[in-house]
Amino acid sequence: MTAAPAEPEKHHPKRSRRAATASLVILFVYLAIAYIAAPEFWWFREGGLNRLAMRTTTTDGIPGDPINVGLVGAKEDLLQAFTAAGWRPADAITLKTSVEIGLSVALRLPDPDAPVSTLVYDGRRQDLAFEKPVGGSADQRNHVRFWHSDPLTPGGDGPLWLGSASFDRGVGFSHDTGQITHHIGPDLDAERDFVISNLTEAGWIRSTYEVKGSGATKDGRNGGGDRYFTDGKVMVGVLGKAD
């Protein structure tokens, strides 16, 4: 006796539409929480933009990475010094560069000019940012942001650039807002020292000195909720090409 052929599975358009609608609702709720509600919560929790001295904030007003490095010299000197040390200027954040960094992380593709997220210091977004990838993608990298600032002492050696250096150890979700972000390594002093030592080895640091920064902390948190520790000092390097 021959078995009857199995009936083809029926397509249920209403069920498909419900599934698609549910997916869109879930996506909308995630975006609303991660990019609107959660930043507002942290804005009120931290007292708005009343940040600690020598510390950055995110564009949502959440306390970010501390200022831990400084350079004295013209903008052209910064560009030449970091180029000589093997660093690259970070691209601006656009749709194109955002897609490129996403593909770099997902597919392990090189992206040495990948954009860095925006941080705010002294009411302004960073003026310059540099990075040095580790491995074959933008997943891990050394990076530093700089803000042009007033000289620490009158009649100094040139323009002062205050910076925030940290190591991106991987991409994930912010512990505070759920937004997609890089997570940083906890040892900020090591990254600060790495920046200065790289520029010194490239022959671009004439002298260094320390100034008071945000203060020592053993359990700080940045804008992505990552824990960090630091002695709270700012290492300042005076730029100048070695003879």
Image (spheres, rainbow, N blue to C red):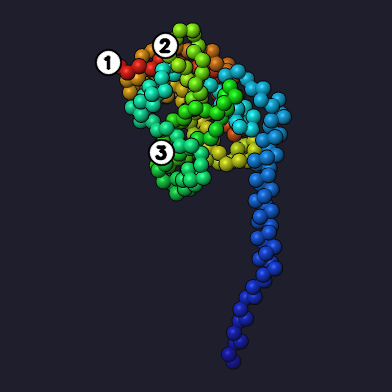
For image coordinates 57% across by 26% down, the residue present is 124
Kindly report the distance in space between the C-alpha atoms of the residues bearing marks 2 and 1: 18 Å
- Residue 149 drawn above or below residue 79: above
Neighbourhood count class around disc 3 (C-alpha, 10 Å): few under 14, some 14–19, many 20 upward: many
For image coordinates 51% across by 45% down, the residue present is 95
- Residue 22 drawn above or below residue 36: below
Q: Name the residue tied to disc 3.
A: 112
Query: Along the line of sight, which residue is nearer the eye, 222 or 97?
Result: 97
Q: Is residue 90 visible?
A: yes
Residue type at mark 3 is Pro
Circle 2/circle 1 CB separation < 8 Å: no
Assign the N terminus to one quadrant of the image. Answer: bottom right
Q: Name the residue tied to disc 1.
A: 243
Residue 148's spot in the image, x, y percent?
49, 21
Left or right for 109, reference 20 = left
Neighbourhood count class around disc 1 (C-alpha, 10 Å): few under 14, some 14–19, many 20 upward: few
Foreground tag (3 vs 2)? 2
Residue type at mark 2 is Asp
For image coordinates 51% across by 42% down, the residue present is 94
Assign the C terminus to one quadrant of the image. Answer: top left
Quarter location, residue 215: top right
Q: Name the residue tied to disc 2.
A: 157
Kindly report the distance in space between the C-alpha atoms of the residues bearing marks 3 and 2: 31 Å
Residue 36's spot in the image, x, y percent?
68, 40
Residue type at mark 1 is Asp
Q: Is residue 228 visible?
A: no
Left or right for 41, reference 59 = right
Neighbourhood count class around disc 2 (C-alpha, 10 Å): few under 14, some 14–19, many 20 upward: some
